[in-house]
């Protein structure tokens, strides 16, 4: 679950920009205060929950990861829609391609493509080797 200051704004990001599908939402006084979404192309879900007016939504030390097969094209499409990507896709030392961005509430997000490397144990060995270099 991700706490947000404005569920409607969160929906515009996760649903309209990233392509998540709305499963359900709950409204209070005709305003969405909770929404559950399904990841595009998978069964993973994420929930957006309205934070109270005095509650911080900062999530230091937490980054959401979403695997995207056509990462470069996906990021180009986000940029064409005017969205800022803090790090464009690049190959990381452990063999995964990553791009970084933030949602409207500042939650860090990594869009990545690991492909067949995702399940290989040797991935972390490559990262350790790169760290020592």
Image (cartoon, grey):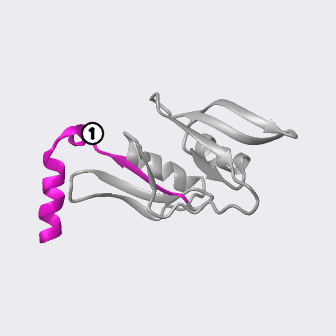
- Please report the bounds of the magenta region as a residue range: 107-133
Q: Tell me how many marks there are.
A: 1
Give the image quarter of residue 63.
bottom left
Q: Position of residue 37 (x, y in %)?
A: 59, 34
Q: Magenta segment: does it hold 45?
A: no
Considering every residue shown, the one lying at the far bottom of the view is 133
Which residue occupies 56% across, 54% down? 80
Badge 1, how many Cα within 10 Å: few under 14, some, many 20+? few
Q: Quadrant of residue 41?
A: top left
Quadrant in the picture for residue 19: top right
125 on left or right of 62: left
Is residue 35 placed above or below 82 in the rendered structure?
Answer: above
Vertical arrangement, residue 113 with respect to residue 103, above or below: above
Q: Which part of the image, by quadrant, shows the N terminus?
A: top right
Viewed as shown, does residue 89 lie left or right of 129?
Answer: right
| Position in image of residue 94 (x %, y %) | 21, 55
Residue 85, image x and y in percent?
49, 61
Identify the residue at image location x=17%, y=41%: 120
14 or 61, which lies in front?
61
Residue depicted at x 21% and y 42%: 117
Q: Residue at x 79, y 37 (%)?
A: 27
Left or right: 34 in relation to 45? right
Which secondary structure, mark 1? helix
11, 17: nearer the viewer: 11
Q: Position of residue 114 (x, y in %)?
A: 28, 44
Identify residue for label 1.
115
């Amino acid at each position: 679950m991700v706490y947000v200051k404005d569920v409607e704004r969160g929906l515009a990001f996760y649903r309209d920009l990233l392509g998540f599908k709305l499963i359900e939402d709950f409204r209070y006084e005709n305003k969405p205060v909770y929404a559950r979404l399904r990841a595009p192309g998978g069964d993973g879900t994420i929930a957006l929950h309205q934070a109270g007016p005095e509650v911080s939504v900062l999530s230091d030390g937490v980054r959401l990861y979403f695997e995207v097969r056509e990462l470069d094209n996906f990021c180009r499409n986000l940029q064409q829609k005017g969205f800022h990507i803090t790090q464009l896709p690049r190959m990381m030392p452990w063999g995964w391609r990553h791009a970084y961005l933030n949602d409207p509430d500042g939650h860090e997000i990594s869009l990545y493509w690991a492909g067949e490397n995702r399940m290989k144990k040797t991935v972390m060995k490559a990262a350790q080797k790169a760290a020592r270099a």
